[in-house]
Amino acid sequence: MPPELTLITGLTSWTADWPSLVVGVPVLAAYLVAARRCGWPARRRVAFTAGVLVMLVSTCSFLGVYDEVLFWPRAVQNVVLLMAGPMLMALGAPVSLLLATAPARVVLALRRVASSRPASLLGSPLTATFALLVPLPVLYLSGLYALTLDHPWVDALTRFGLVGCGFVYYWSRLRVDPAPGTPAHVVSFAITFAESFVDGLLGVVVWLGPLIAPEHYLALGCDWGPTLRADQTAGAVALWFGGDLISIPYLVALLAAWTRSDERAARRIDAELDARAGGAGQHHDVGRQDEDAPTRDPDVQDGLWWEHDPRFADRFGPGPAEGRGVR
């Protein structure tokens, strides 16, 4: 039994959560080594590193020390594992990094997988919606939560499941990495607002509903801390407002991506109209570029950034029998 949770014990209590460390540390090390090899953008490295560290802190800090003693630390932990960590990891573009550094045969295999039906379903808006909205209600409104408290292996699998679901959502909606389908920013905003509604509903149910896994907490015989009801109410607040707070930077990123997409589309249309207007007045030799034509900015090109970066053009360009890039 850990000591009473105070400001001091909250800052000084740490634990080694081995499932998180065994997976998180090697993944981060491999990412940083690969990023250094190919000169990955600093902002991508910072985002991915922050994502892994946030998840490790949520499982190894006082949140991990007290996650079996109090209800609310585990609620904060689960929100972080589903939303905060995966969002930052997705902003680090790990799939693009893998494709940029993996052997050619691995890249070809991954491209075949990316063009398959299961990959298309994985990146669909419906899958993204379920990946974000379903995990927490299932965890708290079924018997799964009690199992995570009593069985470490169930707890570890549940944590990895939350991270996986969160990454699928942010990977498919932020689209920093290659993802099947086409961007649908309106759908992403709609899912975000639906997530806010589900978080609120779940928070109310946890707040006003019956106690969750009371047998476990009563069996601990803890002689300090809030009552079971007050503890669960604090956890309900974390579930309700934690996701909303994390959604703020996500909405900013979505809005920025939407703006850039509209600007690229507008410039592409302008360039096509200019080309048509120029072609109507004079003829050019095939394959000869007009010397007076403006230089095309890479961000204006059709498609996504990784398809035009010279470092990855041979890996993300259309294959001999495939569609355009890894979509």
Image (tube, helix red, strand yellow):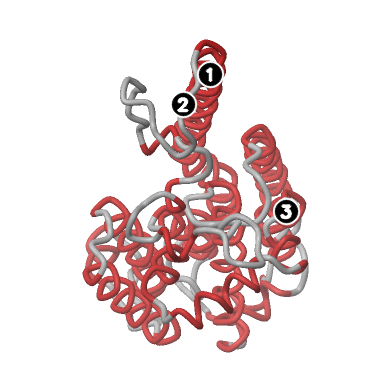
Is residue 305 positioned above or below 318 on the image?
above
Along the polypeptide, which appears first: circle 3 or circle 1? 3
Kindly identify the residue that appears in the image at 37 percent across and 38 percent down.
298
Disc 3 and disc 2 in contact, CB within 8 angstroms: no
According to the picture, the residue beneath numbered tag 1 turns out to be 279
Question: In the rendered image, which quarter contains the N terminus?
Answer: bottom left
Disc 1 and disc 2 in contact, CB within 8 angstroms: yes
Q: Position of residue 173 (x, y in %)?
A: 59, 47
Callout 1: SS: helix
According to the picture, the residue beneath numbered tag 3 turns out to be 124
The kind of residue on which mark 1 rests is Gly
Asked if one can make out residue 28 in the rendered structure from this viewpoint, the answer is yes
Q: How far apart are marks 3 and 1 (CA)?
A: 40 Å
Q: Where is residue 115 in the image (x, y as percent from the top left)?
A: 68, 65
Disc nearest the viewer among 1 and 2: 2
Disc nearest the viewer among 3 and 2: 2
> Where on the picture, by quarter, is residue 151?
bottom right
Residue 2 as seen in the image, left or right of residue 113 = left
> Where on the picture, by quarter, is residue 287?
top left
Q: Position of residue 142 (x, y in %)?
A: 77, 68
Callout 3: SS: loop
> Where on the picture, by quarter, is residue 44?
bottom left
